[in-house]
Amino acid sequence: MAVVLLDSAAVVAFLDSANVFHRAADRAISDGARDDRLISSAINYAEVLRSAGLGHHAQEVVRGFFSELVAEIVPADREVAERAAQLRATKPSLRLPDALVLASADLHADAVLGADRQWLQVTGLRCELRLLEAHRPGR
């Protein structure tokens, strides 16, 4: 059983059937709920709740997703902040929220599930990057 940290992009794609990553997210999260221990970071939880607050999803659906499928929400503590700073030092263009998510995954998970191809340019990660593939009908 692997520990897999869910990035907000994976959660949003799972919840939104019109999202180009929905099929891949649905498959990965459904399989993960059965075979792995799914976690997320406080950063991701805040991002998805903010999205719900903007009307993209019902807040009760978001809270239900996290309470039913996510075993733990990892805090952004000093250790995570220090690891994020290290990651940004090696890749200065890495945005702080992404650095915090990757640091959380690096310290607390075996893998991170997301959709950001720029993460492939980040060096020194100990966790596996599992990137969702977009589904574009007609292509």
Image (spheres, helix red, strand yellow):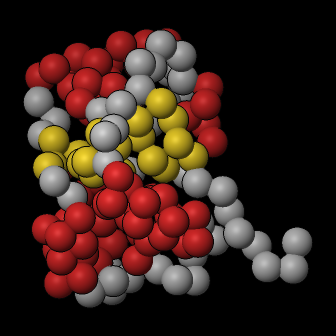
Q: Give the side of residue 5 with respect to residue 70, left or right.
A: right
Considering every residue shown, the one lying at the far right of the view is 139
Nearest the camera: 68 or 85? 68
Please state the horizontal and vertical placement of residue 17, each as a whole percent of the image: 52, 83
Where's the N terminus, which quadrant?
top left
Q: Is residue 133 above or below residue 113?
A: below
Nearest the camera: 125 or 29? 29
| Rendered image quadrant of residue 51 | bottom left
Q: How many marks?
A: 0
Q: Is residue 19 above or below residue 40?
A: below
Where's the C terminus, which quadrant?
bottom right
Q: Is residue 18 visible?
A: yes
Q: Is residue 106 above or below residue 14?
A: above
Q: Residue at x 58, y 64 (%)?
A: 24
Q: Is residue 116 visible?
A: no
Please state the horizontal and vertical placement of residue 53, each as a whole percent of the image: 25, 78
Q: Give the side of residue 135 with respect to residue 74, left or right.
A: right
Q: Residue at x 16, y 36 (%)?
A: 76
Q: Residue at x 16, y 53 (%)?
A: 71
Please state the horizontal and vertical placement of residue 69, each as a whole percent of the image: 23, 64
Q: Is residue 82 above or below residue 130?
A: above
Q: Residue at x 25, y 48 (%)?
A: 37
Please state the horizontal and vertical placement of residue 46, each as a whole percent of the image: 22, 59
